[in-house]
């Protein structure tokens, strides 16, 4: 059985369906419609995930919007991120603004340039 996962990159503007990937990269403006499972999600610019996200490492610089829950080993926010559903994971680093509804087991390391905002 082949366990190799494909990677996908959105450059400029684009939309992809949810699915299982190795690495997902959004550079510009991108949208993912559906649940996402990935080893890595990088957003540079504006990204919107319309579904649940289960990602080992999330790195955002710019603006990220998650319309459902996230599960992440590590989440680094540089800029702003909003999570409309519950979130859980091992560690989060915020250099800007992170808004979330409900967080479980996150260790938040506040960056020196901006506050973490919980609402």
Image (tube, helix red, strand yellow):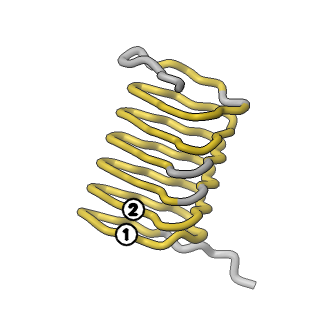
Q: Are marks 1 and 2 in contact (CB under 8 Å)?
A: yes
Disc 2 crowd, CA 10 A, few/some/many (<14, 14-19, 20+): many
Measure the C-alpha gap from mark 1 to mark 2: 5 Å
From this view, report whether residue 25 is shown above or below residue 5. Answer: above
Element carrying mark 1: strand
Q: Is residue 60 left or right of residue 13?
A: right
Q: Residue 16 placed where, x, y %?
A: 42, 71
**Residue furthest toward the top?**
112
x then y, percent, for residue 47: 38, 53
Q: Residue at x 62, y 50 (%)?
A: 56
The residue to which callout 2 is attached is 31
Name the outermost residue toward the left.
12
Q: Where does residue 73 sit, x and y in percent of width and height?
A: 66, 42
Q: Which residue sits furthest bottom? A: 1
Q: Quadrant of the N terminus?
A: bottom right
Residue drawn at (36%, 40%) of the image: 61
Question: What is the quadrant of residue 52 in the picture?
Answer: bottom right
Task: Name the residue carrying label 1.
Answer: 15
Instruction: From the viewer's perspective, tell me whether residue 37 is left or right of residue 78.
Output: right
The residue tagged with tag 2: helix, strand or loop? Answer: strand
Q: Earlier in the sequence, mark 1 or mark 2?
A: 1
When the figure is inspected, residue 42 is found, relative to residue 105, above or below; the finding is: below
């Amino acid at each position: 059985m082949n366990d190799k996962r494909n990677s996908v990159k959105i450059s400029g503007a684009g939309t992809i369906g949810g699915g299982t990937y190795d690495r997902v990269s959004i550079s510009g403006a991108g949208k993912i419609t559906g649940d996402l499972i990935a080893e890595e999600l990088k957003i540079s610019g504006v990204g919107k995930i319309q579904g649940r996200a289960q990602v080992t490492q999330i790195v955002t610089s710019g603006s990220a919007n998650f319309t459902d829950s996230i599960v992440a080993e590590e989440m680094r926010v540089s800029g702003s991120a909003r999570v409309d559903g519950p979130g859980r994971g091992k560690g989060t680093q915020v250099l800007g603004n992170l808004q979330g509804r409900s967080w479980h087991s996150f260790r938040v390391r506040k960056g020196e340039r901006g506050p973490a905002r919980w609402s």
